[in-house]
Image (cartoon, helix red, strand yellow):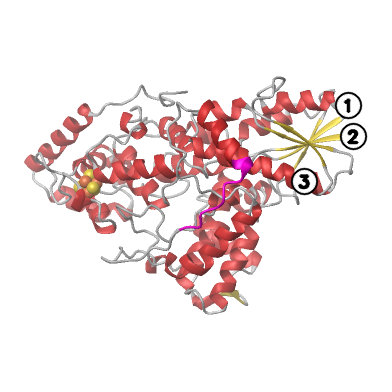
Amino acid sequence: SLPLLLVAGDQLDPELPSLRDAPDEAVIALCEVAEEGRYVPHHPQKIALMFSAMRHFAARLRDAGRRVHYSALDDPDNAQTLIGEAERLAALYGCDEIRATRPGEWRLWQAMAARREASLPWRLYEDERFFTTPEDFAAWARDRRAPRLEHFYRAQRRRTGLLMDGDAPAGGHWNLDADNREPLPERLRVPRPPRHRRDAVTREVLSLVAERFDTHFGTLDAFHWPVTRRQALVDLRHFLESLLPAFGRYQDAISDAEPFLFHSRLAAALNLGLLSPREVCAAVEREYRAGRAPLNAAEGFIRQVLGWREYVRGLYWTRMPDYKRGNPRGASRGLPAFYWTGDTELRCLRRAIEMTREHAYAHHIQRLMVTGNFALLCEVAPAALCDWYLAVYADACEWVELPNTLGMVLHADGGLMGSKPYCASGKYIDRMSDHCRHCRYDPRRVTGEDACPFNSLYWRFLETHREALSGNHRMKLIYGALDRMSNDKRAAMRDQAEAFLASLDTEAAYGRGPHA
Ligand code: SF4
């Protein structure tokens, strides 16, 4: 038998079972296809990162003596869809079977699974790069009314032995999040990220992307992503040596000037397959055990990778396709047009969007508490916000983007992930960032011309959804504060919020951005 081994752009790992167990003469196919580049208007850096990493990976396989077919975007015969191109190549090489690993998207997995019995059959493999399979997750979640992260995370720690001392968590606590909420001090030196050399392959990809995707949101000048395993390891070392010690304490802080702070920015390399979650977690634990990183930093990071990342993936695969339709409050507003331009006077939003445009990156608190929080308060349709996050971040694959946006940011999964939404007023952003001192609005004011729009929107949101939220004991205090306000004050806040919303320039709901 002669199989065609399809390797998707986010599966760049020579240890994939479909590659490992195949005969030497098997044809390995890597395909750049327009379909994947265009169904949301992906940031040019995201497309360039994937194409360059794929081209480097193909070269690495060829160097190892493997037989590789690489379909470039511009090849005249390119079928321009992943499945179409794989089947075209299988016919071209006389293959009798196509082997593929579970991709990052439900729709693709379904399309592949539907071809299992085709005349040219597809054989599908589980993705072993994760700590858990969707089946493992389903078994854990079975019979649980609320499959919460914290329980899953503890089970993962026990199962893997990461940060464990026998049966107990290292240091005696499972979760040190309370130590990870410091705002930034006045003067703080943030280490510069490594600058990777742009070789001929990357330069060619950058010019192809500049030409073909020039209407997409985002610039290419600051492209700094690792496109090879070697470069990804440089980024990992930089994180361990220069960032990890301060990662925990400043994890929730936001800077008006520094886009990366002490965040690892390893998600893109992890999601593409250039790094493995196991090696990254083991390396972070080593730093802690050697006394080079505090426990709150190591634990905070390992919780993200071993806990959160696996948890959202499990939810995605076990709850799709219904998950994607979640919208319990019937939010229907289109995405504010300034998400594609940065043209807004709200400084925190402006900076998050500018950084996103420049780097295809914003750290998780910018995503959750600035762009996400604002969309939640304005009741943007989940599909519109999900498409935006999927398009603009280099690390966004649907399996991780969708639960993060729809479940965590918008609390639109029916309370599966959390019992209450992450909504916050301008006061929170003022405490955690230095944006407000550069802003024309005042985070302490709720009404009046200078009042921070987050404030009246926040109270409006709580009033509007009182019935669904006020019963939650974690919301009691805040509803108590709302109830103590005079009717006049509440009416003024509501008018302020409604006037602001009426002035927002938004796309049609479910918009897919200006260039799709
Ligand atoms: Fe953002 Fe409000 Fe602060 Fe301005 S005042 S930066 S809009 S939180």
Question: In which quarter of the view is residue 170 placed?
Answer: bottom right
Do we see residue 195 in this rendering? yes
Dot placed on the residue nearer the N-terminal end, 2 or 3: 2
| x and y percentages locating residue 209 in the rendered image | 54, 32
Q: Which residue is the site of mark 2?
A: 2
Question: Is residue 195 part of the magenta span, yes or no?
Answer: yes
CA–CA distance between discs 2 and 3?
A: 18 Å
Q: Nearer the viewer, residue 442 or 29?
A: 29
Q: Which residue is the site of mark 3?
A: 61
Q: Residue 423 vs residue 453: left or right?
A: right
Q: Residues within 10 Å of mark 1 (few under 14, many from 20)?
A: few
| x and y percentages locating residue 279 in the rendered image | 64, 62
- Which secondary structure, mark 2? loop
Do we see residue 319 in this rendering? no
Dot placed on the residue nearer the N-terminal end, 1 or 2: 2
Q: Which residue is the site of mark 1?
A: 94
- Which secondary structure, mark 3? helix
CA–CA distance between discs 1 and 2?
A: 8 Å
| x and y percentages locating residue 314 in the rendered image | 59, 47
Contact check, label 1 and label 3, Cβ < 8 Å: no
Q: Which callout, 1 or 3, points to the residue nearer the camera?
A: 3
Compared to residue 105, the image places residue 257 above or below, namely: below
Contact check, label 1 and label 2, Cβ < 8 Å: yes
Q: Residues within 10 Å of mark 2 (few under 14, many from 20)?
A: some
Which amino acid lies under the numbered mark 1 shown in the image of this protein?
Answer: Gly
Extreme residue in the bottom direction: 291
Mark 3 Cβ inside 8 Å of ligand 1: no
Compared to residue 191, the image places residue 73 above or below, namely: above
Query: What is the span of residues highlighted in magenta in the rendered image?
Result: 193-202
Which amino acid lies under the numbered mark 2 shown in the image of this protein?
Answer: Leu
Compared to residue 325, the image places residue 235 above or below, namely: below
Question: Is residue 25 part of the magenta span, yes or no?
Answer: no
